[in-house]
Image (cartoon, rainbow, N blue to C red):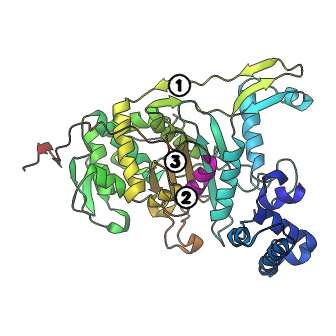
Amino acid sequence: MTASQQYFNRNVDQLTNSQAAVIASILRSPGLYDPAFKEGNEARLKARFEYVKKGMIDAGWLDAKSAANMKFPSIAPRATSGQLSGPKGHIIEAVQKELAKLGFSQDQLLVGGLVIKTTLDQQAQQSAVDAVNKFYPSKAPDNLHIGLVAIRPGTGEIVALYGGRDYLQRQLSDATQSIALAGSTFKPFALIAALEQGIPLTSMWNGDSPQVFDDAGKPYEVSNYGNEGWGQIDLMYATKHSVNTVFVPLGIQVGPNAVVDVARRAGIPESVAMMPTPSVVLGVASPHVIDVANAYATFAAQGVKSKPYLVTQVLGSNKGVLYQAKPETQEVFSKEVMADLTYALKGVVTGGTGSAALALGRPAAGKTGTSQSNASAWFSAYTPQLAASVAFFRDSASESLNGIGGLTSVTGGTFPAKIWTAFMKGALKGQEVMDFPAPSNIGGLDPIVMTSGGTQSRTP
């Protein structure tokens, strides 16, 4: 049991054949095979892994075809020992904080006898840990932080939470407490404001780069990623490719106050400062990962916002119910607006910056986010059943992700999208494949050209 938790963050009955073979290899001689013990052990462990597979075949415990499919698994980073060690410490801390808000004192918890039931799904939580471990960049700096939160749309139940590799080494949860520049994950808020004002996905915009816009009488220069110019494109295409020089004038057109209002309605709390300026659509605000996950859960629930929660029930020592959670929900957007938003965000996955999520093999909609100077990278997306957000960032917004994992630039479509996809595969395993509602085509299907003076019908 100790070895399965230490090397794979799971119980013995959850081990795959590959993971069991690794443990059998290490236990023979940890000094020679434990990859965390000394340099060279990982290479010896991989060789021993192949030897163990051959031995299993010779003993009749494994057929050759199954052995060929057994790949060397990702091993969890070494965590300190103790009840709060590893990623689970962040969950225990989050549950205790929620219990305190519900009125349960520290004395009650220390005395014991209470049965605490949470919203976490074991399969989804294990998938979150496995996904981060699998795609954690090699030779990453010590202050690289990864947060992941998954929320069930329409209820607010937190089904998975990853706040860091080892709670005992860093008590600040990267899922619920750390903040990071939101980047382009905020662009959907401008898109919703536009749809609510009747601006269609077919509206045409100038995607050249750079462009200069007016910010309270001052020039505001905006460039696209890589300074790429796109020419005249529609809003659907601009969403797929996250075109800054379209979304800034879109935000100006609908009004920055409207963008902020949409973000608040979606689930970005008042504690996250947002200024109603043209830059708000580019995600200059710094939310928590759970905030963004909750906003995207609102999209997945077709406009129904829920309050996120972890504790679903508390039973006393006599099994009496001391607390029973009730979802707190509110309809904040129309189904028609959400249908068009989701249609646009599906395009991000099927033919845009989030194409890594195509590997999920089921309909998904979402948005990549890469902040100024590559200080953070996000992938926030959803299926009809589940919404999740993954963020990469460092201790300070002045520190860049450039070069991590061998990449010149860590964008939301790289490691974050891969982690999101691997997590969702495991979390949704065995669940029905569902599709989203058809688009409503708000504003009609005829293209209209957007100009600085307003709109004009496009000449056929």
Q: Is residue 430 or residue 190 the one in the foreground?
A: 430
Q: Nearer the viewer, residue 8 or 205?
A: 8
| Whether residue 410 can be seen here | yes
Question: Which corner quadrant of the image does residue 435 belong to?
Answer: top left
The magenta segment is 419-429
Q: Nearer the viewer, mark 2 or mark 3?
A: 2
* Residue beneath disc 3: 286
Residue drawn at 21 percent across, 47 percent down = 203
Q: Position of residue 292 (x, y in %)?
A: 52, 43
Cα distance between the residues tagged 2 and 1: 29 Å
283 lies left or right of 115: left
State the image quarter where residue 328 is shown: top right
Percent position (x, y) of residue 31?
Answer: 91, 75
Three-letter code, disc 2: Pro
Give the tally of numbered discs.
3
Residue at 71 percent across and 50 percent down: it is 126
- In 3D space, how far apart are the residues under numbered discs 3 and 1 (Cα atoms)? 24 Å
Residue identified by numbered label 2: 416
- Which numbered disc covers residue 104? none
Q: Secondary structure at mark 1?
A: strand
User: Mark 1 or mark 3, which is nearer the start of the sequence?
Assistant: 3
- Give the numbered dot on residue 329: 1
**Residue 115 against residue 318 in the figure, above or below:** below
Which sits earlier in the primary sequence, circle 2 or circle 1? 1
Residues at marks 2 and 3, CA–CA distance in whole angstroms: 17 Å
**Residue type at mark 3?**
Ser
Mark 3 or 1: the one toward you: 1
Q: Mark 3: which secondary structure? A: loop
